[in-house]
Amino acid sequence: MAAEKTAPRLEDQWRDILSVHARTMCEIDRELHPHGLCASDFEVLDILASNTSNTSNTSNTPDAPDTSAAGPVWAGPCRVQNIADRVHLSQSALSRLIGRLEREGLVERSVCLEDRRGVWVALTRKGHDLHTRVRPLQRAVLARMLPGAR
């Protein structure tokens, strides 16, 4: 019983995690707003930017990025489902976010040729350039806000 009173309760630890997350997301939103992005936008761009391949051709396969009207893509395409597994958004919210990023010329969507139900998303040159510009801002917020991140 005494140990329960001195050790942080699980609920308190959970609330602390939620609090750090909320404050950090708000701070990222503030930093990225002047660049037309929010934290969730950046997360999608960051996932796509980390998706290796920096070559371009005209195939719609996972190991061959697409070429678009907005210019060549700058990272290998990623299935929307794989992005959904890594971000904390509903499928419909993620779809709307990707649609907005596509309208802004930051990403390009294409249908998977092998499975017409699948959709690929890849960064355009514009998306890559924006990600490169704002990544240090996001990382600086993480370094400031997350205990022991340095």
Image (cartoon, grey):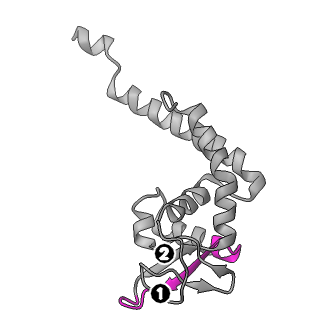
Quarter of the image holding residue 140? top right
Q: CA distance from mark 2 to mark 1?
A: 8 Å
Does residue 36 appear in the picture of this structure?
yes
As shown in the figure, which amino acid type bears the numbered disc 2? Pro
Residue 87, position as x, y percentages in the image: 47, 58
> Residue at the location (37% across, 29% down)?
11
Q: Dot 1 surroundings within 10 Å: few (below 14), some, or many (20 or more)?
A: some
Among numbered discs 2 and 1, the one appearing first in the sequence: 1
**The residue stretch that appears in magenta:** 101-116
Q: The residue tagged with tag 1: helix, strand or loop?
A: loop
Q: Is residue 15 left or right of residue 98?
A: left
Return the residue nearer the eye: 16 or 132. 132
25 lies left or right of 31: left
Q: Position of residue 144 (x, y in %)?
A: 60, 32
Picture disc at residue 6: none
Q: Amino acid at mark 1?
A: Asn
Q: Residue at 66% across / 72% down in the picture?
A: 125
Q: Residue 108 in magenta?
A: yes
Q: What is the x, y in percent for residue 86?
A: 42, 58
Residue 100 appears in the picture as rendered: no
The residue sitting at 63% across, 51% down in the picture is 135
Determine contact: label 2, label 1, CB under 8 Å.
yes
**Which disc number belongs to residue 60?**
1
Name the residue carrying label 2.
77
